[in-house]
Amino acid sequence: MSGEALAPTPALAVEGVDVSLRGVAVLRDLSLSVAGGECRAVVGLNGAGKTTALRVILGMLRPDAGRVLLHGRDIASCPREVWRRVGHLVETPLSYPELTARQNIEAATRLHGADPERAGRVAARMSEELALTGWLDVPVRRLSLGTRQKVGLVGALAHEPDVVVLDEPTIGLDPLAVVGFRELLREVTERGGSVLVTGHHFDELTRIADRVDVLHRGRVIDTISPCEPGRSGGTDLEQAFFDVVLAADRAAAESGPGRFLQAIGDQEGREAS
């Protein structure tokens, strides 16, 4: 209808993505989107395909089918300027062990084309939020796992990206840093940016996410709002998650033992890969 307003283009959209690795289907018709100003989380059991999905979204892995869009543009043809507005941390933080934490963060912001002075000020403030300041001039090889995670997070966020993709970002963080991390994500969404995170800590996801996608056996089987009042389980995200997963497995079992056993085999194959 001409009188209806068009829905805004999502900052990030995944459309019908399929991925197989070593002959095992890891993602099946995966679709999700993240709007401007939204923090969206993806949760799933080990081997559900979470990290693979993020690698596809960031162009690290080419899908067998489907596509990923950044601000409405297929990532296969996105120019450098679009990618510069993306911040990410997937699996282990990538850093140069012989460089200090500060030097690694500076290198990350320069790679994204950020203004050095502004990025330096932003990084200093973020380091305070994560209790990283006292470690900025220490070589990364001497830092603990949790402190390296802080370096990776500041490196992913200091250039003030529009789209942020983070894989289990609170791994190794102490309680004070977790609180500071929440504030950093809030800053991203308040300025209209979009955040996609994965995780296993339901209580933490309830605090940061507007929507939570349940990824199971390679596809999104439900989307949960942590504040959805009428849902079974209420605001108990953990209970809602297991209700959805068990219902999906029960439906697969009832559809035929062959299909159910195949699903289990695929899950084990994904965990092995």
Image (cartoon, rainbow, N blue to C red):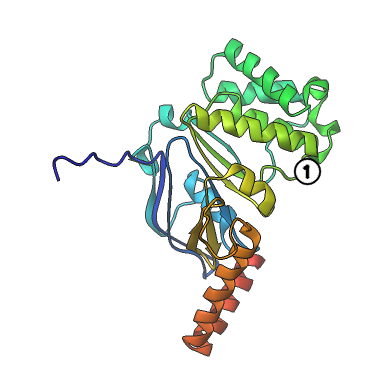
Residue located farthest toward the left when viewing the structure as drawn: 2
Residue density around tag 1, few if under 14, some if 14–19, many if 20 or more, within 10 Å? some
Which amino acid, by three-letter code, is at mark 1?
Gly
Residue at the (50%, 43%) spot, across then down: 58
Residue located farthest toward the top when viewing the structure as drawn: 117
Location of residue 139 in the rendering, given as x and y in whole percent from the top left corner: 81, 26
Location of residue 244 in the rendering, given as x and y in whole percent from the top left corner: 55, 68
Q: Secondary structure at mark 1?
A: loop
| Residue 47 in view in this figure | no
| Residue 241 in view in this figure | yes
Location of residue 100 in the rendering, given as x and y in whole percent from the top left corner: 77, 23
Residue at the (72%, 26%) spot, across then down: 129
* Corner quadrant of residue 88: top right
Q: Is residue 246 above or below residue 54?
A: below
- Tell whether 240 sits left or right of 163: right
Location of residue 119 in the rendering, given as x and y in whole percent from the top left corner: 60, 17
- Residue toward you, 179 or 81: 179
Q: Is residue 191 above or below residue 30?
A: above
Q: Is residue 120 above or below residue 209?
A: above
* Corner quadrant of residue 207: top right
Query: Label 1 belongs to which residue?
Result: 172
- Tell whether 85 sits left or right of 132: left
Residue located farthest toward the front when viewing the structure as drawn: 230
Residue at the (48%, 32%) spot, across then down: 193
- Residue toward you, 144 or 239: 239
* Corner quadrant of residue 76: top left
